[in-house]
Image: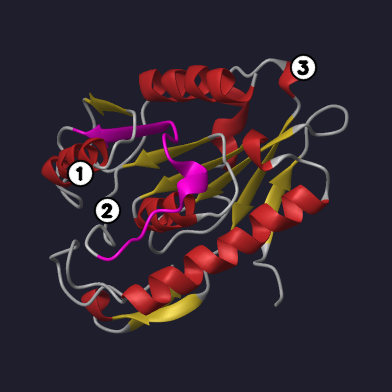
Amino acid sequence: MALLPRVEIEPDGPATATVIWLHGLGSNGHDFEPVVPMLGLAADLRVRFVFPHAPMMPVTLNGGMVMPAWYDIRSGDLERQVDQTQLIASATAVGELIAFEAARGIPTEKIVVVGFSQGGAVGYQLALTYPRRLAGLLALSTYFATQRTLVPHPANAGLQIAIHHGDADPMVSVRKGKAAAQALAVMGYPVEYKTYAMEHSVCPSQIRDIGAWLSARLQ
């Protein structure tokens, strides 16, 4: 299986940790590349950033237009009308990147999955079912699309999860982020939930918080 095409940002010196960051619908792996120097991570953490590109596919919600997408969205009810087969296939493909990082010498316990919007839905599926321990999951402006079907793997029981959402998000309602946090808490995961004064995006105070959270997971 060919690995997903991706952007990689290497640290100074050999990497000892990895962040795999998944973009949202219609974007690509370059989307969050400019955020890296804004995170304020200590150089001695030696974090490699991997930003995969989603495959091109038609998206029903957008009139069948072909664009970068992790899966098809069939209607605006984001929790129900998604192509779960495609979502799970994308999670499997990103899981191959985790295995590749492990083969490059990064312990999976030093790998964090970050996902924005569609990428976050893939992140939930991937991180909670992955058969080796991960360092954490950061879900940004997203929703738990496979909540009713996902079977968690015990390797990541108690996984550290942070959820960030804009309180004025017009694309993914803040209630979907809150619902994900509540569902994960019921499942027994330690969840940190934060909202920010923004829409479907990231903001400076959030980026600082992301940097602090990553530092805590990867030190």
Task: Point out the residue furthest to the right here.
Answer: 13
Residue 44: mark: 3
Residue at position x 46%, y 59% from top? 27
Amino acid carrying label 3: it is Asp
Residue at position x 75%, y 49% from top? 102
Q: Spatial distance from mark 1 to mark 3, Cα to Cα?
A: 36 Å
How crowded is the residue under tag 1: few (<14 C-alpha within 10 Å), some, or many (20+)? some
How crowded is the residue under tag 2: few (<14 C-alpha within 10 Å), some, or many (20+)? many
Going from N to C along the chain, the mark reached first, 3 or 2, is 3
| Residue 9 occupies quadrant | top right
How crowded is the residue under tag 3: few (<14 C-alpha within 10 Å), some, or many (20+)? few
114 up-or-down from 143: above or below: above
Q: Nearer the viewer, residue 132 or 110?
A: 132
**Residue at image mark 2:** 144
Residue range corresponding to the magenta coloring: 149-166
**Residue at image mark 1:** 183
- Give the percent coordinates (x, y) of residue 187: 26, 42
Q: Spatial distance from mark 2 to mark 1, Cα to Cα?
A: 9 Å
CB within 8 Å, label 2 to label 1: yes
Q: Which mark lies nearer to you, 2 or 1?
A: 1
Residue 23 part of the magenta-drawn span = no
| Residue 188 occupies quadrant | top left
Q: Spatial distance from mark 3 to mark 2, Cα to Cα?
A: 34 Å
Q: Which mark lies nearer to you, 3 or 2?
A: 2
